[in-house]
Amino acid sequence: MWSRQRGRLKPLCCGVEELRCRRREREAALRKARREQQLVSKRLLRDEALEEAEEGCVAMIFGEAEIQQFLRLAQRGTEEKEREGALVSLRRGLQRPETQQTFIRLEGSIRTLVGLLTSNQALLQLEAARCLHELSHSEQSAVVEACLPATSYLLTYLSGHSSDFISPHLTVLEALGYALSQLLQAKEAPEKIIPSASTDSSVLGSTLPQHMLQLLQPGPKLNLGVAVEFAWCLHYIICSQVNNALLITQGALSTLGLLLLDLAGAVQRTEDAGLELLACPVFRCLSNLLTEAAAEAVGGQLQLRDERVVAALFILLQFLLQKQPSLLPEGLWLLNNLTANSPSFCTSLLSLDLIEPLLHLLSVSNVVSVLVLTVLCNVAEKGPAYCQRLWPGPLLSSLLDTLAFSDTEVVGQSLELLQLLFLYQPGAAQAFLQQSGLQALQRHEEVAQLQDRVHALQQTALHG
């Protein structure tokens, strides 16, 4: 994840500005890699109760004649049960790649499904949405590309509701949100789906972003399943970097910040499984928006209300530690972006006594350890007053432990933190050496160019 060459420290003679420049370059490269990775994360959303009810039903491969018959019945069947049954059979068949290929070759097939969304019968809407859902999840690029023309119809449908944006059936809205999130990951999305030209056929040119933000507003109308899907939609739009400034001016930062606070309150009130599913895309949206120049222009840091956001984020980190430790890096990446350029967020970490809880996460995994140490580097980088509050405390013993790790990324980040502390905190190097720090470094002489660092530490201790 981190380049060992790029993460390598120089002797202590390098200046503060050089350290900062190297760290900013490395983080910029990492952010780009994360965005690219996040754009190819297919998710399959299926109703567990539905799957249990259909257990034992084998997904059939259907030919053109059978598919056309299902579509005709869905449109013109004499009874609602008959129309719904046709779509259920079609949905099951669309779980097979062979049926998907046949379906997209039929003229007007996608348009027919989208047209059924305008039905005033909720069950028909739901099954049509589920059919689009199966197609959008296809691993075949040709199938996903065939779904792209449906995007403009989806936008018209999703943007055409009342200001409350409430569908006749929330499950329909959830399935459509999922289908749209899958289409937003297509390689053509930044050019064909997302652009902010003044046309209703593009996401940013429609009223959909405002509707998405309404769906993410905390309150009694918030539906977890719907919010999860449209949070992922927002995430993929942000990752495309087509026009994040527009989203920020529409209030995305403040809405997501309020949602983060609400999630922290919710995990304290309930054991409801599933809140972590919303926390993940919210973390990602906020993390990526905070890197935009437009966030600083509109006072993005101030919009997020420093101490409340930091406190909420730590509540969620403790929740994830118990429920879903694999999501800890997402929350820590947000903390990294909050503290990277903001002395006020770093002050919040210190004033709320959150350094020790942060250090407790070092034992979770190497990936988590690197992110924890990166956040601590962000704090130390802010200058002598911050380093004075960090050192020594529990940080000294924690650094001695991380220097004993076998992972070179963890060791490299530990050394970077030490270097910042030695630059800003008189006597830190001597205190470190007195606590067997030199031996800790010498255990890692196989890490490239550590010899000169050991020598530099000795010189600092002698002349400190």
Image: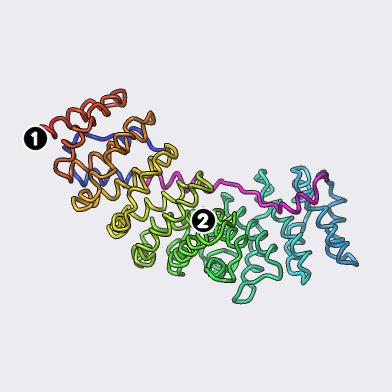
User: Could you say which is closer to the camera, residue 366 or residue 136?
Assistant: 366
Q: Give residue 463's mark.
A: 1
Q: Residue at x 41, y 53 (%)?
A: 334
Tell me if I can see residue 369 in this picture: yes
Q: Residue furthest bottom?
A: 162
Image x and y of residue 376, in percent: 31, 47
User: Could you say which is closer to the camera, residue 107 or residue 463?
Assistant: 463
Crowd class of label 2 (few under 14; some 14 to 19; many from 20; radius 10 Å): many
* Distance between mark 1 and mark 2 Cα atoms: 49 Å
Query: Where is 242 relative to 426, above or below?
Result: below
The tag earlier along the polypeptide, 1 or 2, is 2
User: Could you say which is closer to the camera, residue 313 or residue 229?
Assistant: 313
In the picture, measured across the screen, residue 342 lies left or right of residue 257, that is left
- Identify residue for label 2: 279
Tell me if I can see residue 61 in this picture: no
Crowd class of label 1 (few under 14; some 14 to 19; many from 20; radius 10 Å): few
Image x and y of residue 35, in percent: 47, 48
Q: Residue furthest top?
A: 446
Is residue 30 within the magenta segment?
Answer: yes
Image x and y of residue 34, in percent: 46, 46
Q: Which residues are magenta?
A: 28-56
Q: How is the image coloured?
A: rainbow
Tell me the quarter of the picture where residue 273 sits.
bottom right
User: Could you say which is closer to the camera, residue 319 or residue 231?
Assistant: 319
Query: Where is 425 relative to 400, above or below?
Result: below
Query: Where is 194 relative to 449, above or below?
Result: below
Image x and y of residue 422, in percent: 19, 41
Q: Secondary structure at mark 1?
A: helix
Quadrant occupied by the C terminus:
top left
Q: Amino acid at mark 2?
A: Ala
